[in-house]
Amino acid sequence: MAFENINIRQIVETALRYDAIIVDVRPLDRFLSGHIPMAVNLPLEQVEQGLVNLPRSRVLIVYCDTGGGSIRAARQLSEMGYRVINCIGGLKNYKASLTK
């Protein structure tokens, strides 16, 4: 399966448009230090192990720090049957406020 890519600056707008789940694939400690509002944490390691318990009926928008981890997660989730949107650029390019 394929997935779509968007600029991370479009993440909240896109999530609202699709009623999507924003998924932060960074380790839990990084997530807790600050994440995009409305995001849930699903570390890349868990994705790679197939430990995913998110509704398949919802679009997933994935992001990480720089974009490398999210593209790996997007591929894996897509292969698992999820509809996925990957954020290019990662959190380092996100300019809005983070939630802790």
Image (cartoon, helix red, strand yellow):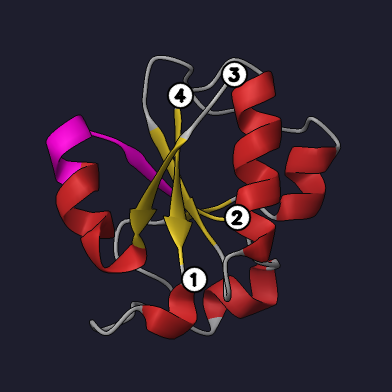
State the separation of the CA atoms marked 1 and 4. Answer: 19 Å
Residue located 54% across and 25% down the image: 2
The stretch of residues the image draws in magenta is 16-22
At which x and y percent is residue 9? 26, 68
Residue beneath label 3, please?
Answer: 1
Q: Are marks 1 and 3 in contact (CB under 8 Å)?
A: no
Magenta span contains residue 40: no
Q: Amino acid at mark 2?
A: Ser
What label sits on residue 49 in the rendered view?
Answer: none
In the image, taking residue 80 as reference, residue 88 lies left or right, namely left
What label sits on residue 83 in the rendered view?
Answer: 4
Disc 3 packing (10 Å; few <14; some 14–19; many ≥20): few
Say which element carries label 2.
helix
Residue beneath label 1, please?
Answer: 90
State the separation of the CA atoms marked 2 and 3. Answer: 16 Å
Q: Nearer the viewer, residue 5 or 19?
A: 5
Residue beneath label 2, please?
Answer: 70
Magenta span contains residue 21: yes
